[in-house]
Amino acid sequence: MRKENSTNTLNKRQMEMDCGMSYTLAAIGGRWKPAILWRLTHGKLRYSVLRDAIPQVTERMLVLQLRELEKDGLIKRIVYAEVPPRVEYELTAKGKSLTPILQNLSDWGEKNR
Amino acid sequence: MRKENSTNTLNKRQMEMDCGMSYTLAAIGGRWKPAILWRLTHGKLRYSVLRDAIPQVTERMLVLQLRELEKDGLIKRIVYAEVPPRVEYELTAKGKSLTPILQNLSDWGEKNR
DNA sequence: TTAGGTACTGTCAAAAATGTAAGTAATGCG
DNA sequence: CGCATTACTTACATTTTTGACAGTACCTAA
């Protein structure tokens, strides 16, 4: 939970206000977000598949990161009214528009690490 | 200070090992790194100029972020043997190669926030 | 009635990142 | 000597992120 008025939060907010880079980095910068986004570029996936595709992530962290991606409008959560439940995650148009950037980040990383 | 064997650190390391995106994001993802890198794309700057160009940053954080950028090979620290001291920071070739990516991140951010 | 499958939630703890405030080293100049 | 200048350090506190682990709700089928 963020503390609305800490210097930390205020600095973060202001950077994201007047720096496009910081905004973008905040959107894709969580520990598990690149892994999630990457998988979703290949298409819609359900929760359990995503979870099994990223073995190190705990369910708690996975859900947290999914919720943030959803809140930022990068992914869409699709719930089917079935039992047992089925939930799928899919990139939105906004999320898809990130794909070339993610590719650049990936390429630069492969080349330079 | 990082704890060498926490799950947190191990996860981070492994992600950066097998995911170029995570490696790149770790390199440019500190709170003040985008601001620093951005200023340096316009050329060499001395410490005090950088500090005054980013009013919210504390000297401690500025130095920490500069040290990380240096350790990751994105910037070079140039010390002149003078009194009072003069230190300049400059992008390395590796750092310069990030410029188009930073521009992409910036453009996407401006368009989508 | 109990077990099973799916997608979570809750609580607590550890670790990491960021911020605050004060202090330091070196030296030339008056 | 005492002061100014620059680029930092250091010690500590707060805030944020991440992780461990147990528990839940729902219906269906045996």
Image (cartoon, coloured by chain):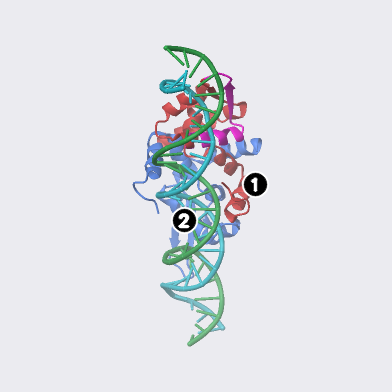
Chain colours: A blue, B red, C green, D cyan
Above or below, A25 relative to B8: above
Above or below, A81 relative to B90: below
Span of residues in magenta: B61-83
Give the image location of residue B85, x and y in percent: 53, 22
Residue holding disc 1: B18
Secondary structure beneath label 1: helix
Secondary structure beneath label 2: helix
Amino acid type at mark 2 = Leu
Horizontal side of residue A112 vs A100, given as left or right: right
Residue B105 in sight in this render: no
Residue at left 58%, top 23%? B79
The quadrant where residue A58 appears: bottom right
Give the image location of residue D16, x and y in percent: 44, 49
Chain ID for label 1? B
Q: Nearer the viewer, residue A63 or C5?
A: A63
- For residue A54, the mark is none
Residue at left 61%, top 32%? B73
Callouts 2 and 1 in the same chain: no
The quadrant where residue C30 appears: top left
Amino acid type at mark 1 = Asp
